[in-house]
Image (cartoon, rainbow, N blue to C red):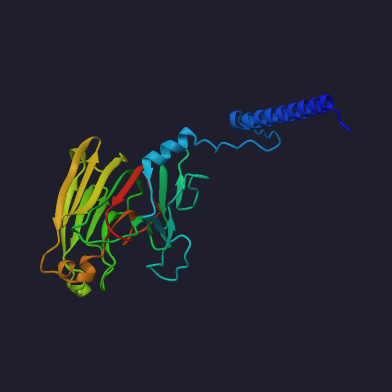
Amino acid sequence: MIKKKQLNTLVVIICSFIFLNSCSSDDKNNNDEDDPIIITDTDGPEPLDPDPIDEETLDLQRRFAFDQNIVIENSYNTSCDSIPCSTVSESLMDIFVNATPDDTYFYLADDGQVLNLECQLDKGRRIEFKQISKGPLTSFAKIEFEGTYYNIPENGVTIAQVHNRGGATNEPFFRLVLHKEGLETVIRKDPEVNSNDTSFLKEDFSFINGADYDLSSLKIVLDKNNGFVNISVEQKDVIILDASYAADPSTDWVNDSGIANGFFLKAGLYNDDGPHTENLLVGYSAVAFESEDQQ
């Protein structure tokens, strides 16, 4: 039989044990709440930084503003049994991301500053930047570029256009033609008349001092907006052409809903008549395009 003294001692021991266990549990809980859990992983690979874009590529991206709304149209990769030849269009998106252009018809010049477009004479005689979207002359679209032109043919070469892909016409409304002795603007009067009845409004503009073209770069801005085609050309910091043209309100350019909503811009080399003695070349130092037209 347990004596009273022994019983009291046992009770004290049991109470002490319970008290100490409770404190230990509280300590543990407090530590869990106050101290953050830090997980270190030294086995996994460190994230890699993306490859930096070099200054030369950044400069090209600044000077050549290509987006999803402009392509390059060429006839180098097509078969051609007779003129005019078919053409193909290629995207210009991200052309400076992995490499610079290095095609037969579109390539970076040796100086790393100029993008060349080369027109192949035996296949359609065409190499151009082309707007994908289209819209009326009242909506805004603009292409701005600076280029030097080589090997100008005797009858000139078209270097910028306001074209049309609506209705039954594929004819350009406006063309800017480069001749050795000057520039010429050409407005087609009506898109759907018989070819024998086709008529044009043409105007001539001289180079500086009335001299022949001397391989100086030309800064050209072509846009359509508010019912007009606007064109300006600068040579050696001198404006040599600044004009605006509207379509005749009595023509299909305005009254045929398909044609009236089908205008788009092009720039490059379009050599539509002879004689042809050599490939044509233009070297661009800058090209920028913007548009509010719908795709």
**Residue 158 is drawn in which quadrant?**
bottom left
Residue furthest bottom in the image: 194
- Viewer-closest of 218 and 31: 31
Q: Is residue 274 left or right of residue 33?
A: left
- Residue 66: x percent and y percent? 38, 48
Quadrant location, the N terminus: top right
> In the figure, 180 relative to 270: above or below?
above
- Viewer-closest of 144 and 213: 144
- Residue 103: x percent and y percent? 49, 51
Q: Is residue 175 left or right of residue 295?
A: left
- Residue 241: x percent and y percent? 18, 45
Q: Residue at x 21, y 69 (%)?
A: 191
- Viewer-closest of 26 and 230: 26
Q: Residue at x 46, y 38 (%)?
A: 57
- Residue 160: x percent and y percent? 28, 53
Q: Residue at x 74, y 26 (%)?
A: 16
Q: Is residue 40 left or right of residue 263?
A: right
Note whether residue 156 is visible: no
Residue furthest right in the image: 1
Quadrant location, the C terminus: bottom left
**Residue 193 is drawn in which quadrant?**
bottom left
How many marks are shown on the rendered structure? 0
Q: Is residue 295 left or right of residue 33?
A: left
Note whether residue 107 is visible: yes
**Residue 42 is drawn in which quadrant?**
top right
